[in-house]
Amino acid sequence: MALSAQWDELFAGAPPRSGGQEPPAAGMRLASANGKEGGGGAPDIQFSKSPWSSAGKVAGELRTGTAGALADLDSASEGVTAGTAGFGATAALEEIRTTWKDRLGAVRDECGRLDGVLRSVGKDFGEVDVKVGNDVKAVAPAEPKGR
Amino acid sequence: MPTWQQLRDVKLSEFSDAADGWGKVSSRANAAKDRVDNEMRARIHETQKSKTAEGAVGDLGRLSRNYQYLHTECGLIRTALDGLATELAEPQRKLKQALEDAENLKFTVESDGAVKYPTTVAVTVPLAPGPGVARPGAPVPFLAGKGEGGGDPNKAKAEDIAERIAGAVRDAAEIDGRYAGVLRRLKSPAGLDVTNEMLVDAAADTKDVQKNAKFLPESNIPKGKSPADNKKWWDGLSQEERDEYATLYPAAVGALDGVPATVRDDANRMVLAETRAQVQLDRDALGPEPDRMIMTRRGGEPVMIENPEWRKWDKKRGPLDAKLKGMDAIQARFDRTGEADRTGEHPLPEAYLLGFNADGIGRAIVANGNPDTATHTSVYVPGTGTNLEGINGDIKRMETLWRASSAMADGSKVSTVTWFGYDAPQSIITDAPQSGYANEGGPVLNNFLGGLRASHEGEPGHLTAVGHSYGSTVIGSAARQGTLPVDDVFVAGSPGEQVGHASEMDVKKGHVWAANADSEPFLKGIPIPFIGDDKYGGINIPFVSSDPVPEIGGWGHAPKKLDIDVLPSWIDGDGMSVVKPLTPSNPDFGANIVATDGSRGHSGYWDEGTQSLLNQARVTVGKYDKVTLEP
């Protein structure tokens, strides 16, 4: 009993039991649970309260990034054919480049699709949609400053 | 095949610019994979689920695989193009030199590569006036003309030039053909699926580029050097070179101590994905399970026997399933990122795969949290019986330690690492008593820990080596053979350290900690005033342990001490024999013997709520004054 209580205390920050029986384990409660703000045990990842819509937001960003990758391929291949005439590798590169453009295009579209799906799952769970929230903010009149 | 004019005119910078573009795509895909895994999958893991939601989680797995596949393959294309540009530079230089020589001599190079030269006046014979033409492949090039009756020095020079032009074009054609072949194989199948076949192909593609990209040989990667030297090599590379080594030699880079954890993780995950795909294909190729029992006739009587076909099938199945089990356990840890067992607990941080190999009993080094940026890092060395198949338990132990440690770290970052980086003994009876496994593993451990020291960012971190059972012997052997580069050593259920005193463990005085599980409660359930211990419902007998390993193993792995003091163990705790093994839990060893309340037997040191675990966490985060010691 006492052992698991000590373990619970580690995470829940429950006050140490009174009495001399208590093993010397106080002082290892969560800093935040002790009432200190911030700093206390910042996890490596910050977790959003709306995981689905924020995952959707990331999907949207990845869609943009993947479209950027497609553009990278196009600009990289500019001038290759003209500047390297006669080389078999140039023809081979053109051949495979189209296959990768196809895959990147498919991945880009998948990101766009997932953006929608994840946000709608979030809405099903009652999350505030980040995108909609931002849109609303964008059209709403600016709040007067210096209130 | 290029002509000499095409070789002269080719803009090799076009190939290297294209390489840069493919490199960008590869890096973007790598970053995208991390975002999918850490910012999308990890976040939605623990939330409520619906049918749509579950479908989306599966789709994210596929998206992650796509980005990993793009990272690998586009990285290989980048490397192939760089190799092409680098290798073509030499024949192009040779060609240009030959053309310059021709021009200086006022020779003309014909479109087919023949070299026209003016015959030397002095040797002009009436029947052979005017210019001569030299073609490559003259019977005795370089000497031509000299041995002939009317030796013409111009003819010799022209033949030499023609030969050099042809040679340069031949070399270029060979290089071009080789890389064209490599590139053609690096194409993507259509669609969004990333199948096992595709991942196996990607592994073959990697080997293919390795073989052909002579400009980037594996031998450039340091081998057998110190972690500091490895780091120096890595730091001296351009970002492009780093990306190329990591995608071309993922296994070597993933295993290189001193290289940043993020780099090793990416490389090893690539190896893991490709290995998993290969093993799964091998498993699928075994086909369905044959009937185990078959009817046969023995002496006319029908009898059931075990099908020899089944036995053959099962013998192949066993090792494959074992590997799959271990690899799936590692993947499952990746998928647990972001999970918390209970409210108030920090969610599990990202995992880092710092080592992986599926050969034999396998290898796996899995970190919770980035050790390069952590203030406190504990590296756990598991003991006898550790293998890839059973790695799940060892991964879980360090998750538990991470939970406990990070909860008492006052906001400092903590990393806990399962280090299965040595050939662990498999049998308690035949292997565990031998020192060889520890003697071989010790230096490997020193190297790994030295790598963590080398790649750590900013101020040096606080580093602890945690050893269980035979794993603690590996730690002791590391200290005996070299320098164990840690601040604290925590051993649990140790059969001995190969050294006889804490002062030989390469840490400051008072920084060796030993746990040895308490005895099974005696007179359980009988409340005895004052001496009864209600925690266990019985009496805990001092100096008697429920963990047999230190008692028995000590005869194999701990130095012995001749002691004429033959006090019984319940008085001084160091055994009453005249010859005593100096295991870390023997007071004469000089370690701090920590309380283990709650742990029982040889495997209870990571049970939640035990003092063994809490004390390990306290040592991990450097809260030494909170450690509870045995009286």
Image: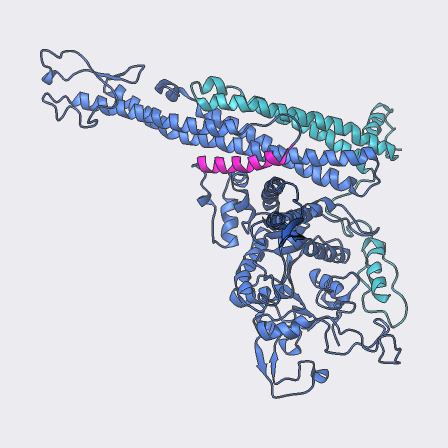
Chain colours: A cyan, B blue
| Residue name at image x 70 percent, y 71 percent | B547
Identify the image quadrant of the C terminus of chain B.
Answer: bottom right
Query: Vertical placement of B333 versus B486: above or below?
Result: above
- Is residue B530 something that shows in the picture? yes
**Magenta region includes residue B198:** yes
Image quadrant where residue B543 sits: bottom right
Left-right relation of B326 to A19 = left
* Percent position of residue B265, x then y: 61, 45
Q: List x then y, in percent, for residue B617.
A: 73, 61
**Residue sitting at x 58%, y 51%:** B455
Image quadrant assignment for residue B273: top right
Between residue B384 and residue B255, name the one nearer to us. B384
- Judge from the rendering whether residue B249 lies leftward or rightward of residue A56; answer left or right: left
Q: Is residue B562 above or below residue B146?
A: below
Residue drawn at x 87%, y 28% as measured from the top left: A143
Residue B296 rendering spot, x and y as whole percentages: 64, 50
Q: Front-most of A28 and B208?
A: B208
Q: Is residue B371 visible?
A: no
Count the numbered circles shown: 0
Residues B541 and B126: in front is B541
Overall secondary structure of the magenta section: helix
Q: Which residues are magenta?
A: B194-213
**Which corner quadrant of the image does residue A102 belong to?**
top right
Seen in the image, is B243 located left or right of residue A17? left
Is residue B132 in the magenta section? no
Q: Quadrant of the N terminus of chain B?
A: top left
